[in-house]
Image: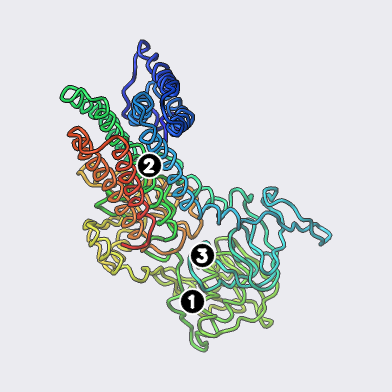
Amino acid sequence: MTQDERPPAARGAGAFPLTRGATWLPALAVLALAVGGVVRLAHADTPWVWRGWMAVLVVAGLPVVVRTARGVLRGNFAADVAASLSIIGAAALGQPVAGLVIVLMQTGGEWLERYAEGRASNAVRALEEAAPRTAHRQRPDGHHDDIEAADIVPGDFLLVRPGEMLPADGVIERGRSHLDVSRLTGEAPPDLVQAGSEVRSGAVNLEGAIVVRATRPARESLYARIVELVRTAQSEKSPIQRIADRYAVWFTPATLLVCAVAWFLTHDPLRVLAVLVVATPCPLLLATPVAIIGGINRAARHQVVVRSGGALERLASVDTAVFDKTGTLTIGRPEVVAVDALEGWMSDDVLRLAAAVEIGSGHHLARSTVDAAMRRGIKPPVASNVVDAPGLGVRGTVDGRDVAVGAAAWLSTLFPSQLDAIAAARGAGLRGVVAVEGTVVGAIEYADHAREGLHGFFDALRRLGLRHLVLLSGDHQANVEGIARAVGITDARGDLMPQQKVEAVRELMQQGRHVVMVGDGTNDAPALSAATAGIALAAHGGGIAAEAADAVILCDDITRVADAIRVGRRAVYIARQSITVGLGLSGLAMVAATLGYFSPTTGAMLQEAIDVAVILNALRASSENQ
């Protein structure tokens, strides 16, 4: 890859700026190649085969030299100069085979990079190809129009038939089905959805037709955001790649110095050319982006989208982990932990009636109530006259009886005569009071729980060297300490506002720690941005947290944090290994060339072997083998 073809961020990284008086050098180099080739071809006593090789060198080498000259004219003096000087020297000294090997090395290295990028882009192509292109929008008369998915607007009613992917995020208005959400969560079991269920683009309808009311345009839906995250993950040049550039930039003057020494000792131009051809490290530079892109690709296979190569390197450097609580270390959705029934009532009866009126509500506690009933094998009856008071509760008619479920304060306004009974049912935790025909019959208690497998996850982090684990939350300190004790975290801080989370993260970083922040909510976004590396859990939507993070976990599995760090460290290790080994081997070859151990042609073939081996080594970063 020549300097003028690199991304804008890469141009000038570590390069030596040339003065205006030196801008004639590239033109002179191009002219030298052409003149040298023409002069050689003009000798009548040279074999026609040799002339043919020289003609091919001039035709094939000239574009490489021109591209390098353009880069130099922009003020960049980097590794490609050595390659161009080798091609010019080969033409001038009548060594066409050596020059053509250098040309092959340039173009072959670029092909390897495109091949590696193609491997890393498979996930992007697969996501884009699977994205829905059309949607069935319902008209007021009940008929449907096929429209472009890009034309979906909030409020549209969309028919989703069995086998089709949901084209936009929304809420189910009619129908009942199971959705395959494996593309979004990585989990194989399908989700049961019905009227009132929130659904996201990217899920596939498995059974009956459903009607979804769109809540976002298709371009802002979860699936579109996932595609965009994966697409942009490979667009930024990583810091370690810039390190490789700096290595190569300083390696070029060192090469010219060795050439000068070879000339001073031997006055043999072929020795100087041999040094040049073994010191052409352009494909070596390609090894670093290949390793970084391979790491990004491998992380994607673990359901982790890393935004850039720089983000991957930052993940590799972390030594301290900071976690949000709700939705991160806990499941983020309170579950039914107890159903208290008053005398004369059975807990299953209380739960059955409550689930009947809440089955159509979109409130998260309502969904938890229905799920609890289904786990107990209770089939809620059909409710009528259901009225949903957002944030307060639900009321409806079940089996001919008036049933109300909701907050104690709301029920107190509905049934003032039941104030004492409501106060007794309220309890200390998060509870919903149930009333039948205006009489309190029981209460349902909810609680959030720590995720399963956290102890093993934290053990994995400690094995990776992250021994300082911190819990930061806006929840009450007592609740935070309870979760911290349950999962084995000693540093737990509650009652924090978003800015206080940022201050806590910065305090750790000021102590010299490299911090990875893991969160899922809007209030976590500032801390995700402030940390060395931020990881967002986006299984429940992500929102601004996903935008602020360096990496996004697409499935509802926090253990993927350890996978992301492990993949980042391996990719960075392989990239650095490629730099060190490649430059080391080239340095040894330069010394051998100075001592006359091989010709320019042999040296070019040796350097080709070194560069290809280093690039192939970098491809290991995308493999699953440790």
191 lies above or below 128? below
Q: Is residue 535 left or right of residue 353?
A: left
The label nearer to you, 1 versus 2, is 2
Give the Cα distance between marks 2 and 3: 65 Å
Residue wearing tag 3: 409
Mark 2 and mark 3 lie on one chain; the one further toward the N terminus is: 2
Q: Which residue is mark 2?
A: 286
Image coordinates of residue 193 in percent, x first then y, are 60, 70
Residue occupied by mark 1: 443
Q: Is disc 1 placed on a helix, strand or loop?
A: strand
Residue 221 lies, in percent from the top left, at: 58, 52
Judged by depth in the image, the label closer to the viewer, 2 or 3, is 2
Q: Residues within 10 Å of mark 1 (few under 14, many from 20)?
A: many
Q: Amino acid at mark 1?
A: Ala
Q: Is residue 536 left or right of residue 599?
A: right
In the rendered image, is residue 172 in sight?
Answer: yes
